[in-house]
Image: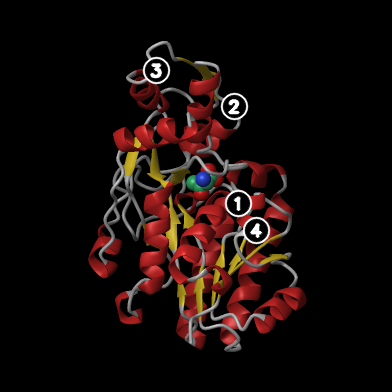
Amino acid sequence: MPKSILILGACGQIGTELTYTLRERYGNNQVIASDIREGDKDLMASGPFELLDATNYGTLEDVVMHYEIDEVYLMAAMLSATAEKFPMRAWNLNMNSLFNVLNLAKDKKISKVFWPSSIAVFGPNTPKEHTAQNTIMEPSTVYGISKQTGERWCEYYFNKYGVDVRSVRYPGLISYKTLPGGGTTDYAVEIYHKALTDKEYTCFLGEDTKLPMMFMDDAIRATIMIMESDPEKIKVRSSYNLAAMSFTPKEMAENIKKNIPEFKMSYAPDSRQQIADSWPSSIDDSVAQKDWGWKPEFNLERTSQEMLDNLSK
Ligand code: AKB
């Protein structure tokens, strides 16, 4: 029997690309896309789509039973910058959707769960460079607190109820198909759009703010890799550090100038600077490399090339 997959938050930045990739891999009808609102028309037309609020257990359970779902990818979340504006809404969305999915797995209605964590689980007291898998974690943002709490619950459901939940801590993600929304690392996507249309960009982070980043193809590959790994290889059931590259806005601008020499960057840091300052600059992902063979493929050079080539089509 082919397995049946449900993606919650399928119209978001990660969900869109994950849906396309999983549909290619397992067949269009095996991958049910869902979101609280409609998104990209091509995505919605490429296979089954359900309008679904992941915080509503009843409707989520109905969809899971109707399609006989085996695996759920929970990509719905409120990101760091928006979560600072709406703390309670962020907490409710990020936590209730996770509990709903973990409880479905606990009750054996689904067999496997993917839930994304983030570098936001770390905080201002965490060592900034090569941040280890296990280190000080004192997140100072609403989003970070929800992700750290989520990690604890994932590990608890695995230990206590045997729930097969798998997770990675995504860095900032760079992609051209769907824009991110409400994150602190969003500048690293906006910059390419503005470089092509306006030849200039005002960055909301300071020029030396170094953050861990990853091209979307690497993020999708990591997600599918961890989900397809043998369960005994997944030794960390909270969430794995994941890394590809780290750079500052200034380094990114210099890189773009190699392709668009007239590109001009200016800086006007806003409230997102404080969030960025609380996060690591680079991540040590050696545990993911050792446990399930993770290895990134895209550096800044290759990412810029992909972004500029695809956005100028
Ligand atoms: C954000 O900026 O909030 C996200 C993240 C790093 O989790 N991209």
State the residue position of label 1: 12
Q: CA distance from mark 4 to mark 1?
A: 16 Å
Mark 3 or mark 4, earlier in chain = 4
Q: Mark 4 or mark 2, which has the lower sequence index?
A: 4
Depth check, mark 4 against mark 2: the one in front is: 4
Q: Nearer the viewer, residue 108 or 239?
A: 108
Counting residues from the start of the chain, the first of labels 3 and 1 encountered is 1
Q: Which residue is mark 3?
A: 260
Q: Secondary structure at mark 1?
A: loop
Amino acid on which the number 3 mark rests in the picture? Ile
Counting residues from the start of the chain, the first of labels 4 and 1 encountered is 1
Taking depth in this image into account, of 143 and 165 the one nearest to the observer is 165
**Spatial CA span between label 2 and label 3:** 26 Å
x%, y% of residue 213?
Answer: 40, 42
Q: Are marks 3 and 4 in contact (CB under 8 Å)?
A: no
Amino acid type for the residue under numbered disc 1: Gly
* Secondary structure state at the residue bearing disc 3: loop
Of badges 4 and 1, nearer the viewer stands 4
> Label 3, label 4: how many angstroms apart (C-alpha)?
36 Å
Which of the 4 quarters of the picture holds residue 292?
Answer: bottom left
Q: Residue at x 37, y 68 (%)?
A: 226
Compute the Cα span from label 2 to label 1: 24 Å
**Which residue lies under the disc numbered 4?**
45
From the image, tell me which residue sits under label 2.
Answer: 270
- Tell me if mark 4 has few (under 14), some (14-19) or many (20+) residues whose alpha carbon lies within 10 angstroms of its own: few
Please name whichever residue, 13 or 41, is drawn nearer the observer in this view of the structure.
41
How dense is the environment of label 1, judged by Cα within 10 Å: few (below 14), some, or many (20 and up)? many
Q: Nearer the viewer, mark 3 or mark 1?
A: 3
Query: Residue 143 location in percent, x, y?
Result: 59, 51
